[in-house]
Amino acid sequence: AVPIPSPTAVPIPVPTAVPISSPTSMPTPSSMPHPVPTIIPTGSPTALPSLTPSALPSSSPSNLPSILPYPNPTPGPTPLTPYPTATPTGYCPNDLLLLHPVMKVDHGVAWASSPTIMDDNSTVSREFGLLSGSVAPGAHSDFTLFLNDKLIGQHGSFTETIPEMASRVEVLLRSTNIYRDQRTVKVAYQLTDSAGRSTVRLGDEFDIQITLFYTGYTQLSYNGTSQTASCESLPNTTSGIGFCSMQTPIAWFSEDHDNEIYASISVLYNTIASVTSEKVVVTCKQLPTFDALIDGNMELVLPFHPLPPGATFDVIVNADTNKQALRTWQFTIEYNAAHLTYVSSTTSTNFTSTFSSHDSEGLLTVSNAGLSNDEASSQVNTGSSIYIATLTFQLNSDVSDMVLLGLFKLTTNSMENDDNIIFVSEKVGQVNDERGTGYTWGQMTVQSVSPVGIFSYAVVSELVNISPLNGIIETSSINTVLIYDESSHIDISGDVICNLYSLSDLEALSLNSCVAYVSSLHHRGSSQVSVLVEYGDLSALVDMIVWYPQHVDINSSD
């Protein structure tokens, strides 16, 4: 407490004895001691003075308390304001000091690192630190002023911690192989800051990009090229997990062999790269080659990439009209009903009055009755690859991973021109599949969706252990997301195993399943406690910070 200025001199005469009773009347001004104090009280005392005079004040006030040292997070979210302030109105400075002003945290988390002080303008302030402890970055804290333990006014100052910039990016490749008809490279990533926090700074200045690199040779002689694009969405604000994709140029594929390309993820702030991931290898599978249709016929085009059990897919029917204007047609498809289920069909809008028949044994026949526009027949229905129809099938869910042979067969029943002349009849159609062309029966590869890795994170990655002082146990749950190839991911937080990476960290933090906690049983802090998260043969590390008091200072006033 700041002492009230003392009189400039000791009153004369000094009392020689303790009064035994109260005075019968107030002393006259002439009997007041001299000199008169220079500061006149602004209000009446709340109670009569005691009969016994108090001890004389010392000649000079005692030293003000020094500011208590307190460690700052390194690095940590930055407060928007250095420390809270408040200026009560209607009080004189000395009145405020007598009322013991104290600045306290009203909402949020902050630890005082100095006593409450007041300047000559009656502005009350106090320094607080460790605003990021036991809360996620971006948290708010509000402060209020108390006089004699009573709240004065509304909230005073407030602070908001700003997440740090991303300084690390981990990637999981979701498309190890890409194909002629599935050329998109898919990557999952997780961002963290330098202390391992998964909540990082986003905003208008933030951008995240995927870059594809090709360093080899293709038939079009692209050598040492790259392509970059911004990711389609921002990462999750809590987990730091995001997804990115980009289509590979067809020129980076080869008809003679597989090619390898590379993918990486970069984080940029104000167009300047902050961090770039390691490069991951993607294989561009060799392109299948196909013979052109000749002499009038139809072809069936199957998927060239593997499909998982239960997947729905399309097959395409095209026609070579042998330089004639195609008016009507009919084709039949035989398919393996033990592995496939027919779903639906659509036909080209150039044709009208289409009809299909289907049986459960795997026989599908589709035909039409004419053109939708007679005048345009020669322009739209003449050529070597005229689109006829799209047929949709579904792989049965009980199909095992394998190459399915003898899956489809196409027969061109008839093709008729504008003069009603049938120029193709009962001809075996061409099947184009993952092998190429020249086969009567088409095949496909079944490959189940499989996990490629896990990402783990703690919503609160900094814990402040003051349990030795207040007995409160601080906890933080560790969450885990399982990433699959292609496009799926699920939360598996309840199915993983968590352990401390180093047993020496038991002095700072413990785990109850995948809940980290600090209590009075722990005796030190740590700038990095690594938690190993395991799911089968997949694993991830989560870094946490533990704050522990090294000394305690107590401030009191009367």
Image: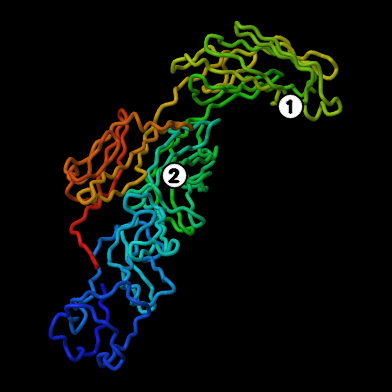
The quarter of the picture where residue 89 lies is: bottom left
Q: Is residue 75 left or right of residue 234?
A: left
Q: Which residue is mark 2?
A: 215
- Relative to 226, does residue 161 appear above or below in the rendering? below
* Quarter holding residue 188: top left
The percent coordinates of residue 428 (x first, y second) are 65, 12
**Scheme of colours in the image:** rainbow
Residue nearest the observer in this picture, 449 or 497:
497
425 shown above or below 273: above
Which residue is rendered at x = 13% and y = 86% of the image?
16
- Per the model, the C-alpha gap separating discs 2 and 1 is 38 Å
Q: Quadrant of the N terminus?
A: bottom left
Quadrant for residue 385, please give it.
Answer: top right
Mark 2 or mark 1, earlier in chain: 2
Quadrant where the C terminus is found in the figure = bottom left
Secondary structure, mark 1, is loop
Count residues near mark 1 (Cα–Cα under 10 Å), then give few for <14, some for 14-19, many for 20+.
Answer: some
Who's the residue at 38% across and 64% down the image?
Answer: 145
Q: Position of residue 350 (x, y in %)?
A: 77, 25
Residue 256 in percent (x, y) is at 48, 31
Under mark 1, the amino acid is Gly
Image vertical order of residue 505 relative to residue 137, above or below: above
Residue situated in front as seen by the camera: 72 or 172: 72
Along the line of sight, which residue is nearer the eye, 188 or 481? Answer: 481
Name the residue carrying label 1.
383
Q: Which mark is residue 72?
A: none
